[in-house]
Image: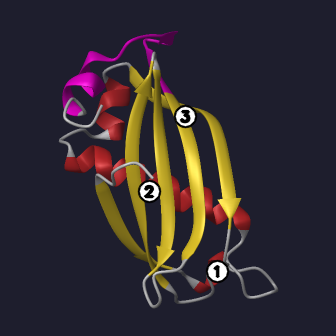
């Protein structure tokens, strides 16, 4: 496991659960994304402001392994470890239930950057993430 550089705590909301009482699989992507956006804010970047400047970080690939389901009202943390391969930022993320520290899901999310709609090397991200990549 790569070094965790950021954690964000959340709680399952009842409407995120399916008929079986488990968090619906699609919501894990929301948790991963919310954590990445919080990480950007932590690093002094605002996703919306970057977009207004023509800089868009977009997901190019997602791989998720589901381990143990979260259920309603579970508190959990989502972590980030980061690496860079060429133009791709790879976010290694984990969702861990706080009550017992069990791994519920792990994801590998690949993100690329478009500057004014063109796949580009984003200096703004390289500068913000320089201590991690």
* Coordinates of residue 92 in the picture (x, y in percent): 48, 47
Q: Secondary structure at mark 3?
A: strand
Work out whether residue 23 or residue 68 is closer to the camera in this orientation and state it.
Answer: 68
Say which label, 3 or 2, has the lower sequence index.
Answer: 2
> What label does residue 15 carry, if any?
1
Question: What is the C-alpha distance between the residues marked 2 and 1?
Answer: 17 Å
Residue 120 covered by magenta stretch: yes
Say which label, 2 or 1, has the lower sequence index.
Answer: 1
Q: Secondary structure at mark 2?
A: helix
Image quadrant where residue 46 sits:
top left
Q: From the image, tell me which residue sits under label 2.
A: 34
- Image quarter of the C terminus: top left
56 w.r.t. 40: above or below: above
Disc 1 residue crowd, few under 14, some 14–19, many 20+, Cα 10 Å:
few
Disc 3 residue crowd, few under 14, some 14–19, many 20+, Cα 10 Å:
many
Image quadrant where residue 99 sits:
bottom left
* Coordinates of residue 106 in the picture (x, y in percent): 58, 59
Name the residue rendered at 31%, 21% in the picture: 53
Residue 116 covered by magenta stretch: yes
Q: From the image, tell me which residue sits under label 3.
A: 110
Question: What is the C-alpha distance between the residues marked 1 and 3?
Answer: 28 Å
Segment tinted magenta in the rendering: 112-128
Q: How many marks?
A: 3
């Amino acid at each position: 496991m790569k070094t965790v550089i950021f954690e964000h705590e959340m709680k399952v909301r009842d409407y995120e659960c399916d008929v079986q009482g488990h968090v619906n699989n699609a919501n894990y992507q929301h948790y991963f994304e919310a954590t990445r956006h919080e990480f950007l804010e932590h690093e002094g970047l605002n996703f919306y402001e970057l977009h207004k400047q023509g800089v868009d970080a977009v997901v190019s690939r997602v791989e998720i392994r589901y381990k143990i389901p979260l259920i309603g009202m579970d508190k959990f943390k989502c972590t980030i470890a980061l690496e860079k391969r060429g133009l791709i930022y790879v976010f290694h993320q984990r969702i861990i239930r706080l009550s017992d520290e069990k791994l519920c899901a792990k994801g590998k999310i690949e993100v690329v950057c478009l500057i004014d709609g063109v796949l580009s090397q984003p200096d703004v991200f390289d500068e913000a993430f320089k201590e991690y990549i």
